[in-house]
Amino acid sequence: MHLSSRHVPARVLVLGLVLLLGLAYCSVVDKVALPRYVPSAETRALGHPTFAEVREAERLLPQHRAPGRWALGGKGKRGRYVYFPWEAWGTGWNNVFQEQLLNTHLAFRADRGYVFGDYIARDHPPFSDTLPNGTRSHLHIPMGAFTSGPTGGGAWGGREKGRPRGISRAWWDVVCKGRKTVLSAPEMNRELAIGPETSGADRMVRWGAKLKDMEAECVEVVDGTPFDYPFIITDKPASIWDWPASYGASLTLTAFRWSALVTRALIRNHALFAPSLPTHLRPSLPWHWHLRLLGPPDLGSTAAPLPLSAVPPLTITAPPLTGLLALHVRRGDYQEHCPNLVAAAVPYNTWNALPALPDRRSPHSEMHAHCFPGVTQILAKIESVLKTERKFKVERVYIATNGDADFISQLTERLKTTFAVPVASSRDMRLTPEEEAVGQAVDMAVLTAAEVFIGNGWSSLTSNVVQLRLAGGRPAARCRFW
Ligand SMILES: *[C@@H]1O[C@H](CO)[C@@H](O)[C@H](O)[C@H]1NC(C)=O
């Protein structure tokens, strides 16, 4: 009697607490104003991946819940946002992504949440997108399929305090309904005295100050963007890297994470670029324990992949993959493209022109060999990099490439015989259709994590790898170009 009378209240207390927590949780989840994603008839007809898990995670981001409590950064207000619907329309994903990362930093400087949308694969679609009646239905890839970092609404690397997080386009439409302030980019450039000669740093600083000073909570920039494609392909952006624009040290880059989808592909394919699964790529609870208890780790297959909730998104500050030499060998359309780039004296792409990098574009040397190197030239460059990076011992090679099977097997054989190490390429990756849709990002995650990287100075893919490597702490001497 005595005992139970002491125990019953305890049990009731626990039960009550569980019920309360449950209710609190439900009240939060119930407040998600965004509807669940439903794939269109066209998506289903084409058999395109729907990114259902990614979209559901995006819908449930804390900042997409009850506005007052979860706006993050609004401090009791409704939150401040900036949306750039004109971001690099129609260019390849890496060009768009360069602009999106810069705009995330701009939004941060303006004390506003960055608004992110789907990437629409108009250029180089990864799957056929032509309907039976001949119309195209573009593949839409959610931002969360590429990155879980600040650009995809992710955390600011634990340094959150009062910093607004990014929101999805869908949530922008809900939370900013009927109170959007539209700003014309060309008009704003005139007001801020920004012209073709203005440095990248000045652009970032002036736009940031302007957007910060504005009272309006929801600002939409139209008819252009602050860092448009013609600006990005010049050598102007380089000055944004250091103080006063300070992009290179920004939380946009240092808190960058690849998506869980990209990381899952790395976990399954880790044998292509690492001797064993790196600790920081181990799937998390409860799968981790499940795997430990049941013997050899089950890392999922393409038919039965790991649930994305079990995958820890890879950070760029994680330890490098020791002994890995990663190459970006751009082929395909570059065969025709390179003579034009060389003839027009096009500078190295965006971040590839940062002054800290050892390999500069030289106007005097044989540029075609740098843009479209053959097997012999690739081998020669590797030898010269190994000569200067004496502390680096090559233990395996990964080649990110869109080259054809013949070329890759020639290159692979030469590398294997020369260095006596395992060699793998993009073609060896085993990917689900959703991972294949972001296959470039999967390759880039390997290139970013590698101890030494050699890429193509004109390529925006290489350029994005370079900025993430530098921001993640890899030495400039280990970011090289053919
Ligand atoms: C082709 O089919 C799609 C999907 O049914 C439809 O939306 C589109 O209007 C059609 N286009 C033409 C030209 O008939």
Image: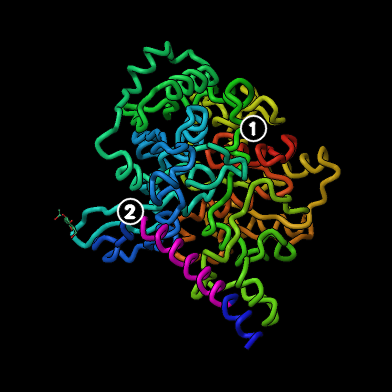
Residue 469 placement: quadrant: top right
Across and down, in percent, residue 5 comes to 60, 82
The dot on residue 314 is none
In the rendering, at what x and y percent does residue 124 appear? Answer: 40, 49
Q: Is residue 44 magenta?
A: no
Seen at 33% across and 31% down, the residue is 220
The quarter of the image that holds ligand 1 is: bottom left
Indicate left or right for 13 with 292 as reference: left
User: Please, what secondary structure does the residue beneath circle 2 have?
Assistant: loop
Q: What stretch is highlighted in magenta?
A: 11-33
Looking at the rendered image, the quarter that the N terminus falls into is: bottom right
- In the image, which is nearer the foreground, mark 2 or mark 1? 2
Point 59% across, 30% down: residue: 247
Q: Which colour scheme is used?
A: rainbow
Amino acid type at image mark 1: Ala
Q: Name the residue under label 1.
A: 249
**CB of residue at label 1: within 8 Å of ligand 1?**
no
Q: Which residue lies furthest to the right in this view?
A: 391
Instruction: Report if residue 30 lies within the magenta region.
Output: yes
Asked if one can make out residue 136 in the rendered structure from this viewpoint, the answer is: yes
3D distance between C-alphas at marks 2 and 1: 35 Å
What residue is pinned by disc 2? Answer: 33
| Dot 2 amino acid type | Ala
